[in-house]
Amino acid sequence: MTISDIGPMSILPNEKKVQPQAIDIEMAVLGSMLIDNGTILKTLDLLATEDFYNEIHKLIFSSIYELYLIKNKPVDILTIYNVLQNKELFVNAGGISYLTKLTDTVQTVANVESYITIIKEKAILRKIIKAGYSIISDAFHEERSAGEILNEAQAVLFNIFSQHKNNTKHDGCINISGLIQPLLKEIEHLHLNPNEISGLSTGFKDLDNKTTGLHPAELIIIAARPSMGKTALALNIAEYVALHEKKPVCIFSLETTRSMLILRMLSSLARVNGWNLRNGQCNDNDLKKLHKAANEIASSPIFIDDNSNITIMEIEIRARELANELYKNNTPLALIIIDYIQFIRSKQQRFESRQQEVADISRALKSLAKDLNVPVIALSQLSRKTEDRSNRKDNKPQLADLRDSGAIEQDADLVMMLYREGYYNRDDTALNNKALLMIAKQRNGPIADIPLVFEGEYTKFSSKYIMQED
């Protein structure tokens, strides 16, 4: 039966059909736990109560959990019977005779891990069925928009997928002895190759030296007041990673359209005045450089989503979808850029304050970085405090100036603040091209100020070393 076959009075198809389950396997796992306490921790670590299909099995499993982990008591037929003897469901199932039956199904406890895999597989299939029923029901009732139903469906199905992936790659606690040698080899390699960095290069030499590059699972904040150039800086990093390192970059642009981002990249890469580019005042030499830059950008692994009304849930879903697709092609996603935090809507509809909403978004971005194991650069606005200070020499931003929530500072591994003194002192032309990237927080490195050169006509930041070479 397909969805198109379902009539208006039959919202849930095949309601009487038995869902995927493995009762005998569930019995064998519970029986193993009752006769061999050594299997209990392993099983409790890999299974949850809801993974069992049979209700009496859920009751027995939760009782084992309570007795062994919470009350720190031994588990066997008699101790579990003592816990369950007053439960009607347990009594109706046969009481102590049913517990004996469970142990009788066990031929060897050596097969428990294989049994656990089967139980998890059946549980995942049931979750898929439940999600499908829910999607169909929502669509029939038409109480929410199609977009809302699709977004929730994507989130639910991806959550099931993530659980399945995590179940098949469960590592648990690893003895430190197995982690030392790989780290030593990496340190020795960097010692023999001093010009290399351990993370992803940004293209800015001084910045890479202070941070050793951008690292997987890190949340990186680039913060500034409007018009300081934080979007330009993020695009410069994206260009370097995609064009020079040949690694995929995903950009979520909530403020700027795809076309405008591409124009900025063309101006930066071709070194053609951005204003002339937008109004068509380009000479023949400019056009040649633009064609060359366009070919480079067109062949680069840059992916752009410019939905201005996107939620954090949609960002998570789309980033994961892209990461999975790239992984299949053996070109793993290297970097995510989000422009910018204050434009993102939370997956929840209501918060008591904007600070709580931004905190929720910040935590989600950190989780996204960890789950996909890629650095996430999120741009953020600074509050007006820098401009309201009476002393004009005190315009430099501070961590306390991060707008809307202290959670951004807390969740971030690296916070960088962009500052151009020339923005405030426009009469001093000597300051026009000077910029400062201030590392205000670095979880695993030093605090430092990185001098940069700002070329506004090209929407481009450059290292001072690069400018000297030019």
Image (cartoon, rainbow, N blue to C red):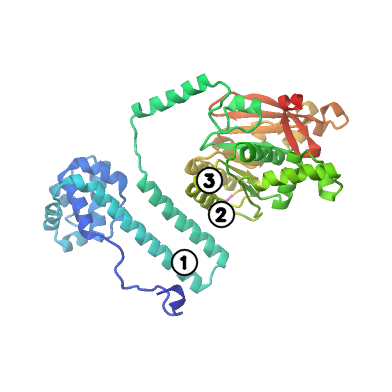
Whether residue 210 is situated above or below residue 241 in the rendered picture: above
Judge the density around disc 2: few (<14), some (14-19), many (≥20) Cα neighbours within 10 Å. Answer: many
Mark 3 and mark 2 in contact (Cβ < 8 Å)? Answer: no
All told, the count of numbered labels is 3
Disc 3 marks which amino acid? Answer: Ala
- Please indicate whether residue 272 sits to the left or right of residue 128 in the image: right
Q: Which residues are magenta?
A: 347-352
Mark yes or no: residue 33 visible: no
Task: Looking at the picture, tell me which residue is in the foreground, 15 or 460.
Answer: 460
Q: Position of residue 50 (x, y in %)?
A: 32, 55
Q: Quadrant of the N terminus?
A: bottom left
Which residue corresponds to the image point at 46% horizontal and 66% vertical from the top-left? 135
Which residue corresponds to the image point at 35% horizontal and 39% vertical from the top-left? 171
Please tell me which of labels 1 and 2 falls first in the chain.
Answer: 1
Please tell me which of labels 1 and 3 falls first in the chain.
Answer: 1
Q: Secondary structure at mark 1?
A: helix
Disc 2 marks which amino acid? Answer: Glu
Q: CA distance from mark 1 to mark 2?
A: 17 Å
Q: Secondary structure at mark 2?
A: helix
